Image: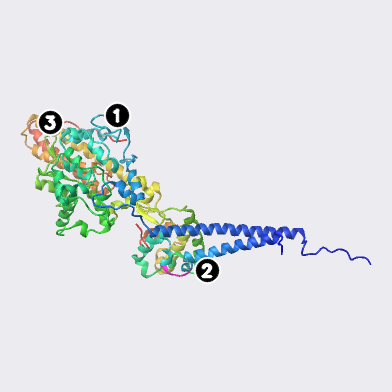
Amino acid sequence: MALNGRQRAGIAAVVAVGVAAGLGVFTFGYARGASYLTNDPAACANCHIMSEHFAAWQRASHRAAATCNDCHTPHTLIGKYLTKARNGFWHSFYFTTGTYPDPLRITERNRGVTESACRYCHADIVAEIDHRPARHDARDATLSCIRCHTYVGHWVR
Amino acid sequence: MAEPPAIIPSDSQPPPARRRLSARMLAAVAAFAVVTTVAVAALLTNIVERRQEARNPFYRVVALEDTTTDPAVWGKNFPQQYDAYRRTVDQVRTRYGGSEGLPHPPTAADPRSVVAQSRLEEDPRLREFWAGYAFSKDFREERGHAYMLSDQEFTERQQATQQPGTCLNCHASMYATYLRLGNGDLTRGFEAVNQMTYQVARTNVRHPVSCVDCHDPATMQLRVTRPAFMEGIRALRASLGVANFDVNREATRQEMRTFVCGQCHVEYYFKGKEKRLTYPWAKGLTADSILAYYDSVGHRDWVHTASRAPVLKAQHPEFEMYNQGVHARSGVACADCHMPYDRVGAMKISDHHVRSPLLNINRACQTCHKFPEEELRARVERIQDRTFELRNIALDAVLELTRQIATVSARDSAAAGLADARRAQLYSQFLVDFVEAENSMGFHAPQEAARLMAHAIDQARRGQNALVRAAGALPVALPGSVATKARP
């Protein structure tokens, strides 16, 4: 049966989508993509760039209290996976293009996430310190937990 | 019968608008799929490459041994490190260090076509400061590791006096030479070189400091290869209650990242007629403890021409000064700032282009100090400006004392108080030199540098007081103050 132009274009589009999906599934598996959906800190060190941070966390005071996700993702189900998806996309983008600062610098948004995490667990002590209402914005670096407590998570030299 | 009107079948001729839309949709889906495939393929190959790099940190293409002195051979296995190592030929100035490449017409005695700027021309007071010592003839800003051998071979100090082979301990790759001359015994080879003349010893070496001087060729682990450091650190640890310290067996990896540099960036003297290179640390690492050590063994470097005071010259005591500072206290090693890690693909390698952290603030400082580069530079330079100001005041104080001693002793060489004044000059001069010769202009330990300058000025004051008593009895007018000439 002879195919007309539109049918041929349709088949080509379906094949292209299939190739993209197949390559995507393979890459997801090869890059241990499923591990990123877990809470296991070792997953974050799949990429070599995180090895030192992971090693430093294992020696830091918070290793017994908090994993990567506890400080680097919000404490809500949607917020957590939205942040993971967002960071996962941009990490893949920047590592593939190679355009990122090294030593790594945390983004403003992610700094805010971490700051909120400090305040979530240490709410009692934060309330005692942080009684100025104008300074409650978690992204406000002028009264930020991690400006002084740089060492608690993972101190990489 | 009339034929029914021809009906255009709907499946073969859809309305034109809908057909265009779905064709466009198909094109868009295909284009999106193509872009996604390209992006995912790029990500995939990137991950594959990184994993390959992590699997093979290096390829062993040549066998390395203790006798492999030539860095180019090591460079075949470690091209990234070798490439950076070769860049130590660069000449870039910082405000108080680095070096400036100046043209130099080659002569028979000195074939160098480029040299660093003369510190004696920058600050002519230094000629008077070191009067009678070879450093008053020629003293240039230190250049990168690549120049260590030629800059020592062709300095005019070689003509001013006969230098011993000991000098080469820190100006050439010595490990293989020591092993060869000592028939496998490092210390015996070291002793043999110390007792040669510089010129004879020079024929036994070929390269500036090389890979084998810091690395074990089998494991690449850091190791100390200089007997003088092994002996010096053992004496220092003994003074702290640790007997028989063996640096290569007992030091941690992080300590070794400082100790391999401390093999040479230290204060030293040539002990006895064997010219044994010795690090004066048996009483401690501070300038005061080192002076106390020199007093206890009676060592002096030369007699100052103007004042006839037996004096000492401090030589680049970076290791000692750094150990008094906050970075040492925090466990930061020399290599953390002077050879910071660089990422090449999945590999993390230390930058063998050893240089001032001020030329590499991002990797040297910002790994720990998350502040803007300009702020960090300003902090460092503020510390250095202050130290330089203190050093200028203290240097003037020493020169004033020196001139006054000369005046009094010209009038009466047996005047009471001269011995005290000369001893004060010895202390004052050594303390100023300790900061002047140290290659950080105070940054390695700012408060320690300030403390030493306070003691230097105090010693000069004591010396002058001793002379005031002598001059009052003579009487003689003492020469006035020395005008400070600061570097631009």
Left or right relative to B333: residue B415: left
Residue that sits furthest to the right in the current view = B1
Do pointers 1 and 3 mark residues of a single chain?
Answer: yes
The picture quadrant where one finds residue B330 is bottom left
Q: Which mark is drawn over residue B407?
A: 3
In the rendered view, tell whether residue B75 sits above or below residue B410. Answer: below
- Amino acid type at circle 3 is Thr
The percent position of residue A58, horizontal first and vertical second, equals 35, 66
Task: Please provide the residue range marked out in magenta.
Answer: A37-41
* Residue B105: mark: 1
Residue kind at label 1, given as amino acid type: Pro
As measured in the structure, the alpha-carbon distance from the residue carrying label 3 to the one carrying label 2 is: 86 Å
- Whole-number angstrom distance, CA of label 1 to CA of label 2: 73 Å
Mark 2 sits on what residue?
A: A78
Measuring from the top left, give residue B153's x and y in whole percent. Answer: 22, 37
Principal secondary structure, stretch drawn in magenta: loop
Q: Amino acid at mark 2?
A: Ile
Q: Position of residue A98 (x, y in %)?
A: 46, 53
The residue mark sitting in front, 1 or 3, is 1
The crowding category of the residue bearing disc 3, from other C-alpha atoms within 10 Å (few below 14, some 14 to 19, many at least 20), is: many
Q: Verify whether residue A40 appears in magenta.
A: yes
Which of A2/B90 is in front?
Answer: A2
Q: Are marks 1 and 3 in contact (CB under 8 Å)?
A: no
- Chain letter, disc 1 residue: B
Secondary structure at badge 3 equals helix
| CB-based contact (under 8 Å), mark 1 and mark 2 | no
Q: Work out how far the residue at label 1 is from the one at label 3, CA to CA, in angstroms.
A: 41 Å
B364 vs B437: above or below: below
Viewer-proximal residue, B160 or B8?
B8
In the rendered structure, the answer to whether residue A131 lies left or right of residue B319 reads: right
